[in-house]
Amino acid sequence: MFAELAEPPLDPILGLAQLLARDASPDKVDLGIGIYHDEQGKAPVLDCVKAAERWLVENQPSKRYLSSAGNPDFNLQMRGLLFPEGSDAYQRARTIQAPGGTGALRVASDLLKRLRPEGRVFIPGPTWPNHPGILKASGHEIVVYPYYDLASGALKFDAMMAALADLRANDTLLVHGCCHNPTGADLDIDQWSAVADLLEKAGAAVLVDLAYLGLGDGLEQDAAGVRLLASRLPELIVASSCSKNFAMYRERVGALTVVGGSEKDAVLAHAHTLPVIRTLYSMPPDHGAAVVAQVLDDATARAGWEVELRTMRERINTMRERLAARLAGQSARDYGFIARQRGMFTMLGISPEGVETLRRDHHVHLTSSGRVNVAGLNSKNVDRVADAIAAVSQG
């Protein structure tokens, strides 16, 4: 059955990694793969993570199975990151560990298909390229709503709301919680409120993808949209990840949080999610979740993590400002939107041919869509990258 298989299409991110590896230039810059790089261009392990791993080596009593819900301490801590302990939303929520944010999204997708088999899922255009693949794998019908204007670097909020007026009670809205991937353009609090109004009226479900909590403006600020929805809606689902904010990409640490109209409803939703997990991967890996639980449960370790997270966030935002400032006046286009956006990514609006020129002539590697990982910039390369972008834009 394997002999006559055709060559599958190359994954764009994996293909980009291969192109980067083949570039022998000592000045090559990786702005494609979505990981955080420090000022030295390294993807570091956080100090708080190393300390927690050392603690686990010495103190973890067993490697026995836990359950399909995963690490219970991790689940409590992740619920507390989303909603203040003791709040109404916290009481109405239950969290399940998943293998990364991707695993959380797939569990949510399969759960929604069981609960709303005829419903559609509305996703932003553009969005993370894996969103449609995950949803289609569960059998969902997908509707793309307008979200971002590539030319101006701004949200198309009026067009978005007009499209979402078609939401029906059995549909689901997928929205990014903060640091939108791939654009970096987020809803402000008034826009979140308008979305809540629309969802209340339609009776539709909402799935929030929160992969970058703390990398935008801060933990509290980045959770504001999710918390507003929880205060206004009886139910929501949140898929969150520790890949970026703990820099634990390969450990696959994620969580799925269900919020019900009551604590009883959340407990029932949690229980109905476990059979979905059982048939997907049975139980999530524990090591990364145990590390995160150890960091968040210890006041000193958590304070250290928040310092390291702030360092990452501020470095990314500084690179945004440096890139936008250097580009100012070098081309007819206004790149000021880069500094106003948040998170690791922005969309330059460069054609695939321009991207190829950046790779070939300037050794600057980004995705063919023109998405840039701003975290790949540093003080040594940001000006050169800006000059290269300006040259391609003018060409």
Image (cartoon, helix red, strand yellow):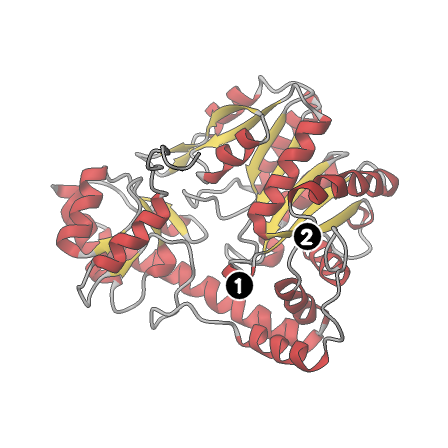
Q: What SS does tag 1 mark? A: loop
Q: Is residue 88 above or below residue 245?
A: above
x, y percentage for residue 249? Answer: 50, 59
x, y percentage for residue 31? Answer: 32, 55
Task: Please identify, in this view, whether the residue under mark 1 or under mark 2 is nearer the observer.
Answer: 1
Identity, as a three-letter code, of the amino acid under mark 1: Met
From the viewer's perspective, tell me whether residue 90 is left or right of residue 27.
right
- Residue 67 vs residue 161, the one in the foreground: 67
x, y percentage for residue 273? Answer: 74, 40
From the viewer's perspective, tell me whether residue 279 is left or right of residue 324.
right
Q: Is residue 234 above or below residue 295?
A: above
The answer to whether residue 191 is visible is: no
Q: Residue at x 52, y 30 (%)?
A: 123
Q: Decide: marks 1, 2 in contact (CB < 8 A)?
A: no
The answer to whether residue 314 is visible is: yes
In the picture, residue 226 is in which quadrant? top right
Q: Which residue is mark 2?
A: 82
Q: Residues within 10 Å of mark 1 (few under 14, many from 20)?
A: many
x, y percentage for residue 303? Answer: 63, 73
Tell me the quadrant of the picture where the C terminus can be found. Answer: top left
Q: Which residue is mark 1?
A: 248
Q: What SS does tag 2 mark? A: helix
Identity, as a three-letter code, of the amino acid under mark 2: Leu
Q: Residue at x 34, y 68 (%)?
A: 41
Q: Earlier in the sequence, mark 1 or mark 2?
A: 2
